[in-house]
Amino acid sequence: MIAALISVVLGLLVNECCDVSPWCADKLVQWSAYRRYIDPVRAAERAEELAALIKARPGKLLKLFSAVGFASSAILVVCRRELDHHRTPQERQLRTGDNATLPSWASLFPSGRKVYYEGSDPDGFLAQIQAEFGFNPARDPGWAVLLNDDDEEEAPFFSYGFHCPAEHLDAIYGNDRFPMGS
Amino acid sequence: MAGPPRVTNPLLDVLEVFIGTLHSDADLHGWAIMKTTKRSGPTVYGVLDRLEDIGWITGEWEIRNPDPSKPRRRFYRLTPTGLAGATELLRERRPQSLRPGRHAQAGHGLPSWRDGLPQGGIA
C-alpha cells in the first residue's frame, strides 16, 4: 500500500518537474542574458532571442539542459569580467594584446636605463648602433667586462652592459629587434 | 579593415555558414547556425556577439514567426565589411570552403523566413 502510494507520488513529482522545466528554462535563459551582457539593449535582445531558441528545442528536459548551458556560459563570462575588473590597466592591455596604449620605455625610464646586449655578435651590434643611433655603447665601462674570471665552477664570460639613452630605449630595448636584457 | 579579435574554429565555422548562404534564399538565425555548425548555443552566440561588435554582421527581427504558435526570430546577415573580411579570412584559413559547389550545399535545408512574412517586411 505504502509502496504504491510512494510510486504514485513520485510519478506525480516527476511529471510536475517535467512540466515545470520549460518554464525554468525560459527564466534561466533570460537571467543568463541579463547577466552576460552589460549593454541593456543587447541583453534584452538576446533574452528574447534565446527564449525563442529554447522554445524551438524539442523536449522539455532538453530545453532545460540548453538553458543550463547558457547559464553556465554566462556565469563564466561574469567571473571573467569580475577578474578583469580587478586587473590593472596594464595587465588588461597585456591580456587582450592591446599594446597600443601601453606606456613607452622612454616614459618609464626618462633618464635612460642600463641594458645588456645578449647576442653573439657584439661587434656587429656596436657597428649597427653607432650607424643608426649615433652613440657608442663600448664607451660604457660596463661594456665587455669579463665575469667569473676567478670562479672555478663556472666558465668566464663577457658582459656587454651599457647605458641606453631614453630616446633610444624603445627602438633598441623595447622590441624584439636586438637580443637585449636588463 | 578591422579583423575579428580572435580567430577560432567556431568563428570560421559560423563564417562558412554565412558565406554558404549568400547565394541561397535561406536566412540565418541562431538555431539554424547551431544546427549547421553543430556547435553549442553559447559558442555560436559568443561568435555572433564578436561579429556584431566588429560590424561584420547585423541582426534584424522578423515581425512575426510564420508559425503563429512560435516566437519571432532574429535573423543575421553579413555586412559589406563582413563579407569582404570573411572572404579574406576563409581564403586564408579554409580555402576549400570558398569553392562554388559548397555555397549551394551550405544553405541547403535552411528555412526561408520570407515566405511567412507579411507585406510589411521585417521590423
Image (cartoon, coloured by chain):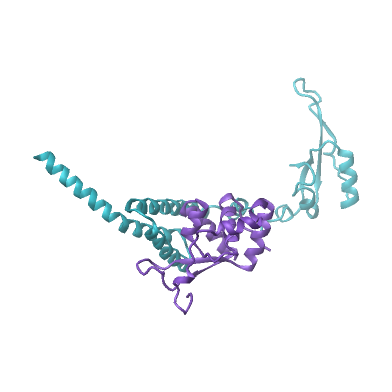
Chain colours: A cyan, B purple
Residue drawn 75% across the image and 21% down it: A153
Residue drawn 27% across the image and 55% down it: A20
Q: Nearer the viewer, residue A99 or A6?
A: A6
Q: Where is residue A121 in the image (x, y as percent from the top left)?
A: 86, 37
Q: Is residue A79 left or right of residue A144?
A: left
Q: Residue furthest bottom?
A: B120
Q: Which residue lies furthest to the top in this view?
A: A152
Q: Position of residue B55 (x, y in %)?
A: 59, 66
Q: Nearer the viewer, residue A79 or A3?
A: A3
Residue drawn 59% across the image and 56% down it: B16
Q: Position of residue B68 (x, y in %)?
A: 36, 70
Residue B38 makes an appearance in the image: yes
Image height check: is A175 above or below B76?
above
Q: Nearer the viewer, residue A35 or B57?
A: B57
Residue A139 makes an appearance in the image: no
Residue drawn 84% across the image and 39% down it: A143
Q: How many marks?
A: 0
Q: In this view, does B19 lie to the left or right of B117?
A: right
**Quarter of the N terminus of chain A within the rendering:** top left
Q: Where is residue B69 in the image (x, y as percent from the top left)?
A: 34, 67
Q: In which quarter of the image is residue B51?
A: bottom right
**Quarter of the C terminus of chain A within the rendering:** top right
